[in-house]
């Protein structure tokens, strides 16, 4: 009985979020921006309540023995709260994707046909500990004309509730329904499973968190899921590469932030330049504390490199470790990437036009870069403004997702009474 | 043991199709067009075998008591086979979507970022009796650079096998792997269920057939599904409509082909013009054998109209029946469509600019038409060239799907050695 009551309550909340979607979809840009600023204002005005709620979560996390890193990610401070408010104001400054006519064409019968960008409807975000995701996701979904169902992690339960209450005050100040940002008041997995069956009410699910969460969502969802598993990113140093530039791409890609998905994991080097490049690269990596694991040809040039196994080529280290392989030619590099890559981000260093073009065309990854660091594979860096996630699956969105990925297109047709068949 | 063996064999076939995807994705346009023409040639050259195989299916269908309409849809003739070959040649004539750079922009650091259109990879089509779907789907998927797994219905088993064998000869003539068009040699539902788990090998599933098939696929698939349930299409005759033009839209939309998804099912009329429009419309409909079911205000104006129930407003009749309702104002029309519509196709007849713009913007349907017949909601009519289906869900594709819907976009970035952080 209790379970059924909970289930019904969950569905009622999702229905209220869906009911708000039509109103939110039809808001003008200025109305949405005013709401975003009001939400930011209310976050700041609720600082005391939010930090008090956060302290409850942080104390529980420490008592439950969570790692220092996880406690740090969970912790809110006045500065971090101000950052969350600033992020909402930044979203207000982005272009509104809704209503854009992306293309029009005329048909022989005079019909004018075009694509108009429209909101998706209701988006569900399922995420783990960071409380800032609550306001970030709410802001991005609202700007793209969607309502959002948020299901945060249990560690941040009180923080998320306090943040959502502040956001609701902002929405209400602007006459908008609080259900536009619906935070589920439960963190158990049964609620996720239930949510994932509601394909008549929710248009898209975006899980953000560890691989376990993402796989769970993917396996149980009857709603379309946009997800990102891992980034096994390669740099291929071609025989015609500028080796100094290639070295900078390697160092930036591997060491500027090794724990993120667009960091380099494997270096491929054409054998014609391996002798010149690998010892120089090994020295620069060694100086930065990077462990090198290589194929026999790599180890012949860099004797202190460890041996790379098949597992190393599949690995997303997210650490200061780099796998390296000498390849006999360009096609072998493409074959390696096709076999071991994760469709995330791939880089070539070359000055050869033909191979640059072939790499760009033939490598199947969401971001393919020629003579630029893998670390640019990011919504902000690529110029999308916001980034709501990265998709490594191909349907709907592939690669960094900005506001546009939270919309779809409809056909709009203008005529003067045209019929398909003559009507007498 | 037998079941496991079958399962393994199925997976081996899908793996072979996946293995062919990289080669097919990198084919140039001319190579794909040559293959399409070769497939068309081989269909014609195999006429005797294909018609003999089809006769086996048709005899079985008759013996099993299938309806005359279903037997007709299953039956191939020399003319229909020629039509299938012509359809492949027509696909060859379409623009190749692959490789198109749809947009580029420069970043402040000099990076040139763009979107490049690329194939999805492997597409599974699950369909029912018509054998022409085998060659149509194969041609469209190939032109968009994808390989395809086909699972046809049991009624057309022998026909589909013979068609696929001819297509394979065409592929082989052009040096392409027959696995690029993989017809599964089984028609049982267990094979569908197994197929729908292979999300590591298949990028997209498109079911085509009855609502039962589509629901089954949607409920069991772990692969993204693009689907189309039903079309409950409305014509709203505004107070500022040209009533003669509106009548032509009504007659074309309701009677030119009542059994298709873009036919009109419900007429909404502003009460200010109901007295002028409804009697005239009823007469024209009566003359064409259309049964009218209306609200009380409709029936006051058209005494022989039957009473429309709530179910009538939700109904996709696909027959010569029309529901009608008089609405007090424009917003009531929008509310009716939001409640009863199926997000397929919606039409307004009006000469009022503001309401035309609001209807176009606010109505949530994949195709929204102003002063044009609902029957234009079709890939060919809208100018997409081919049509592989219509999507009434919003992810990835919404509305009629052409070749472009069988592709996705990747980011391509050109630089001169840019790094995200300075590297000394």
Image (spheres, coloured by chain):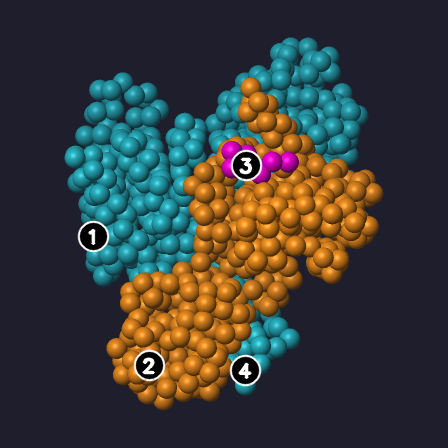
Chain colours: A cyan, B orange
Asked which secondary structure carries label 4, the reply is: loop
| Viewer-proximal residue among A20 and A68 | A20
Tell me if I can see residue A100 in this picture. no
> Which residue corresponds to mark 1?
A169
CA–CA distance in space, label 1 to label 2: 54 Å
Residue B102 sits in which quadrant? bottom right
Distance from disc 3 to disc 1, alpha carbons, whole Å, reads 55 Å
Q: Nearer the viewer, residue B120 or B167?
A: B167
Observer-nearest of B146 and A204: B146
> Nearer the N terminus, badge 1 or badge 4?
1
Task: Find the residue positioned furthest to the bottom.
Answer: B276
Please tell me whether mark 3 or mark 4 is closer to you in this view.
3
Distance CA(mark 3)–CA(mark 2): 49 Å
Q: Which residue is mark 2?
A: B304
Task: Residue at 45% x, 62% y: name it.
Answer: B231
Please say if the residues under marks 3 and 4 sit with CB atoms less than 8 Å apart: no
Quarter-of-image position of residue B280: bottom left
B332 left or right of A94?
Answer: left
- Label 3 secondary element: loop
Residue bearing the label numbered 3: B188
In this view, the mark in front (1 or 4)? 4
Mark 2 falls within which chain? B
The disc at residue A423 is 4
Q: Position of residue B135 (x, y in %)?
A: 68, 50
Residue under the point 61% across and 77% down: A109
């Amino acid at each position: 009985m209790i379970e059924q009551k909970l289930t019904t309550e969950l569905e009622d909340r999702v229905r209220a979020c869906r009911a708000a979607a039509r109103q939110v979809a039809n808001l003008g840009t200025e109305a949405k921006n005013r709401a975003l600023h009001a939400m930011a204002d209310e976050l700041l005005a609720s600082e005391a309540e939010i930090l008090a709620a956060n302290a409850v979560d942080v104390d529980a996390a420490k008592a439950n023995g969570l790692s220092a890193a996880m406690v740090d990610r969970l912790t809110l401070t006045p500065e971090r709260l101000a950052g969350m408010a600033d992020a909402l104001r930044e979203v207000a400054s982005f272009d509104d994707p809704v209503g854009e006519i992306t293309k029009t064409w005329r048909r022989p019968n005079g019909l004018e046909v075009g694509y108009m960008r429209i909101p998706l409807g209701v988006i569900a975000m399922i995420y783990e500990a960071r409380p800032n995701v609550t306001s970030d996701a709410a802001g991005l979904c609202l700007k793209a004309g969607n309502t959002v169902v948020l299901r945060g992690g249990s560690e941040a339960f009180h923080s998320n509730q306090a943040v959502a209450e502040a956001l609701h005050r902002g929405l209400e100040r602007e006459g908008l329904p609080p259900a536009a940002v619906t935070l589920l008041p439960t963190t158990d997995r049964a609620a996720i499973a239930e949510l994932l069956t509601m394909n008549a009410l929710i248009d898209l699910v975006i899980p953000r968190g560890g691989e376990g969460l993402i796989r769970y969502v993917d396996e149980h969802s009857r709603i379309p899921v946009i997800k990102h598993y891992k980034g096994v990113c390669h740099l291929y140093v071609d025989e015609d590469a500028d080796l100094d530039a290639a070295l900078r791409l390697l160092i930036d890609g591997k060491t500027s932030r090794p724990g993120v998905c667009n960091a380099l994991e494997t270096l491929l080097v054409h054998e014609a330049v391996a002798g010149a490049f690998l010892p120089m690269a090994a020295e620069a990596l060694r100086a930065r504390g990077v462990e090198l694991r290589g194929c026999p040809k790599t180890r012949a040039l860099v004797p202190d490199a460890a041996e790379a196994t098949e597992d190393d080529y599949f690995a997303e280290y997210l650490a200061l470790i780099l796998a390296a392989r000498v390849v006999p030619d360009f096609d072998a590099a493409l074959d390696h990437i096709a076999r071991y890559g994760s469709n995330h981000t791939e880089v070539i260093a070359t000055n050869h036009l033909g191979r640059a073009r072939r790499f760009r065309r033939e490598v199947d990854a969401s971001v393919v870069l020629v003579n630029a660091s893998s670390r640019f594979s990011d919504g902000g860096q690529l110029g999308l403004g916001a980034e709501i996630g990265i998709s490594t699956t191909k349907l709907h969105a592939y690669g960094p997702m900005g506001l546009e990925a939270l919309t779809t297109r409809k056909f709009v047709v203008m005529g003067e009474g045209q019929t398909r068949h003559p009507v007498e």
